[in-house]
Image (tube, grey):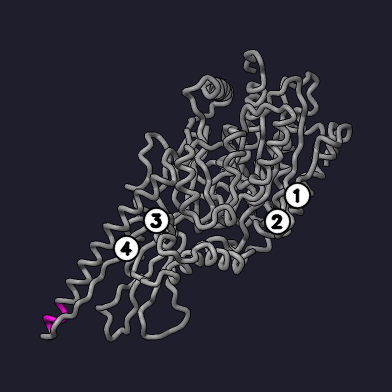
């Protein structure tokens, strides 16, 4: 591959590599991720520096991974221990959204040709006709990001003057699902830290795009949003449809919780100037598997919940209040309907109550233990049954088994967390270390802006999910404990190395490739900025970070 890249301008190198990488399928949770890792390693090993230093590029197998996935590492050694980590993810989402165009989903030229005559979306058509955009699954998210890091790896490996610090590159699997790649990478990072590497910062280049039509800015993020997955297990009281008004219908309760939580802007953190999305319902089902005329006994739902400065404890406290208010209002509503119906038909009322207990998982487990019930044996049994299966299903199965274990089996809503959990990562500008990074970033962006006319805007949090979340953790021990106590068997379902994340404490700056429609069949990357401006911006900022003295801006 090196022979195809050498002596070409960096812009051409980056585009050529993006086309090559986009052509290789690497869907999350398939063998393609491993194949893509091998392809990236082969590219790196073709560079002259790594022909001379073969030990400085290596593949890390992800332990116990069902798909045999890998991370690819490459290192350029510098004069000091100061180290910048560059990271990008290998995997993409699949191509079902392309429909009949699936066969060309990885063919950038064929897609561009198609979209030049695609008049169903004039914005896409205009971009295709401009020839400034490169199409294809993964072109934006984020094969172009890998390409940008690769051309910088090549450029820095060939510069004549020695590097002032180490440049460490990571191309990891499984960002689009459960982040197995970056979690495995933490252990490799710790090993290198023990060998003397001093991590200054990480640079991710996950994609960015306009936040509104005509948005002139390129957004740079000095941190990443976190995420929790709060879950509701609702156990009601079943009834025949002929006696429906005596039921406690878990689907009705779930619907009310969904109405109050899903897309509720008031639940988004009020952070001035930040792009903060509200909670989103990702799952809602009852327990019925076939038709009958009985109401459901239980229902399940969970939400994607972004956290920026809030913690899992904050989210749990907030949802407990919402759930209690919803259940109390539905209790009164059900009582009123029952009494109204019986009055209408001149029937006496019976002694029914529609009360639901609302508890968090930790409270529920504590109450069961006080009753002397075999909580651990029950959890062990479910854990064994769900090895290798969906971890959210496993968490719900554990909660359901404990509800069945309780001899009272009272109607209740149990709130808990399920995997994944992503810590929020942000640059602490209040200390000298964080302030230095922000100052160097601002200075470099101002210089690039004056040279190119680009308009940059620095934000604190990358507003979506990113691997950078796992490089630093700001929660206190107490706040982490709340999460651990309210995620069923977290040490088994989601063994997050929290102590390791805290120990590494690497701020992750996202200086992203630029494009539109990530995760859509119209996905495309803007070539002039991504290939023409971004590589130099990232490389010069990285060199600024490892420099002992202030560098002159070019």
| Quarter of the picture holding the N terminus | top right
Q: Residue at x 43, y 66 (%)?
A: 300
Q: Which residues are magenta?
A: 340-344
Q: Residue at x 36, y 85 (%)?
A: 293
Residues at marks 3 and 2, CA–CA distance in whole angstroms = 34 Å
The reply, left or right, for residue 167 in relation to residue 469 is right
* Secondary structure found at label 2: loop
| Quarter of the picture holding the C terminus | top right
Q: Where's residue 508, x and y in %? A: 58, 34
Disc on res. 61:
1
The reply, left or right, for residue 360 in relation to residue 548 is left
Question: Residue reaching furthest right?
Answer: 52
In this view, the mark in front (2 or 4): 4
Q: Are marks 4 and 3 in contact (CB under 8 Å)?
A: no
Q: Where's residue 30, x and y in %? A: 69, 60
Residues at marks 4 and 3, CA–CA distance in whole angstroms = 11 Å
Q: Earlier in the sequence, mark 4 or mark 1?
A: 1
* Secondary structure found at label 4: strand
Q: Is residue 343 magenta?
A: yes
Disc on res. 65:
2
Say which residue label 4 marks: 357
Overall secondary structure of the magenta stretch? helix
Q: Earlier in the sequence, mark 3 or mark 1?
A: 1
Q: Where's residue 131, x and y in %? A: 62, 44
In this view, the mark in front (3 or 2): 3
Q: Are marks 2 and 1 in contact (CB under 8 Å)?
A: yes
The reply, left or right, for residue 36 in relation to residue 456 is right
Q: Where's residue 424, x and y in %? A: 50, 40
Q: Earlier in the sequence, mark 2 or mark 4?
A: 2
Q: In front here: 371 or 23?
A: 371
């Amino acid at each position: 591959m090196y022979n195809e890249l050498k002596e070409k301008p960096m812009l051409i190198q980056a585009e050529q590599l993006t086309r090559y990488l986009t052509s290789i399928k690497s869907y999350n949770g398939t063998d393609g991720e491993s194949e893509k890792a091998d392809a990236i390693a082969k590219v790196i090993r073709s560079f002259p520096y790594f022909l001379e230093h073969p030990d400085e590029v290596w593949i890390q197998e992800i332990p116990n991974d069902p798909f045999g996935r890998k991370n690819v590492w490459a290192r350029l050694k510098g004069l000091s221990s100061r180290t910048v980590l560059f990271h990008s993810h290998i995997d993409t989402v699949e191509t079902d959204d392309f429909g009949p165009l699936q066969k060309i989903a990885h063919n950038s030229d064929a897609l561009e040709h198609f979209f030049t005559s695609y008049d169903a979306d004039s914005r896409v058509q205009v971009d295709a006709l401009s020839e400034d955009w490169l199409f294809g699954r993964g072109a934006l998210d984020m094969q172009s990001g890998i390409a940008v890091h690769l051309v910088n790896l090549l450029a820095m490996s060939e510069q004549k003057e020695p590097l002032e610090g180490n440049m460490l590159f990571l191309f990891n699997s499984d960002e689009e699902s459960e982040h197995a790649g970056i979690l495995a990478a933490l252990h490799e990072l710790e090993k290198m830290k023990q060998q003397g590497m001093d991590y200054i910062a990480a640079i991710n280049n996950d994609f960015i795009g306009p936040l509104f039509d005509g948005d002139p800015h390129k957004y740079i993020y000095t941190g990443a949003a976190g995420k929790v997955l709060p879950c509701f297990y609702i156990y009601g009281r079943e009834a025949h449809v002929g006696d429906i008004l005596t039921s406690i219908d878990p689907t009705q309760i779930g619907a009310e919780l969904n109405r109050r939580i899903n897309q509720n802007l008031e639940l988004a953190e009020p952070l001035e100037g930040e792009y903060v999305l509200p909670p989103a319902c990702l799952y809602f089902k009852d327990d019925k598997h076939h038709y009958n005329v009985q109401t459901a006994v239980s229902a399940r739902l969970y939400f994607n919940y972004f956290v920026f400065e809030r913690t899992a404890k904050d989210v749990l406290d907030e949802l407990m209040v919402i759930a209690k208010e919803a259940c109390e209002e539905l209790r009164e509503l059900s009582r009123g309907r029952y009494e109204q119906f019986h009055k209408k038909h001149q029937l006496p009322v019976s002694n029914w109550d529609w009360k639901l207990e609302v508890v968090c998982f930790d409270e529920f487990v504590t109450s069961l233990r006080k009753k002397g019930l075999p909580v651990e044996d029950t959890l062990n049994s479910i854990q064994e049954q769900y090895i290798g299966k969906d971890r959210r299903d496993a968490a719900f199965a554990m909660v359901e088994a404990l509800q069945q274990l309780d001899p009272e089996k009272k109607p209740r809503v149990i709130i808990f967390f399920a995997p994944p959990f992503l810590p929020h990562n942000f640059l602490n500008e209040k200390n000298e270390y964080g302030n230095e990074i922000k100052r160097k970033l601002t200075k470099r962006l101002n210089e690039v802006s004056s040279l190119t006319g680009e308009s940059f805007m620095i934000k604190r949090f990358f507003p979506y999910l990113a691997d950078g979340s796992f490089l630093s953790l700001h929660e206190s021990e107490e706040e982490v404990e709340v999460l651990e106590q309210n995620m069923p068997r977290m040490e088994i379902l989601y063994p997050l190395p929290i102590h390791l994340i805290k120990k590494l404490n690497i701020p992750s700056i996202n200086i992203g490739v630029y494009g539109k429609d990530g995760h859509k069949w119209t996905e495309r990357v803007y070539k002039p900025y991504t290939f023409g401006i971004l590589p130099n911006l990232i490389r010069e900022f990285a060199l600024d970070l490892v420099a002992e003295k202030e560098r002159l801006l070019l």
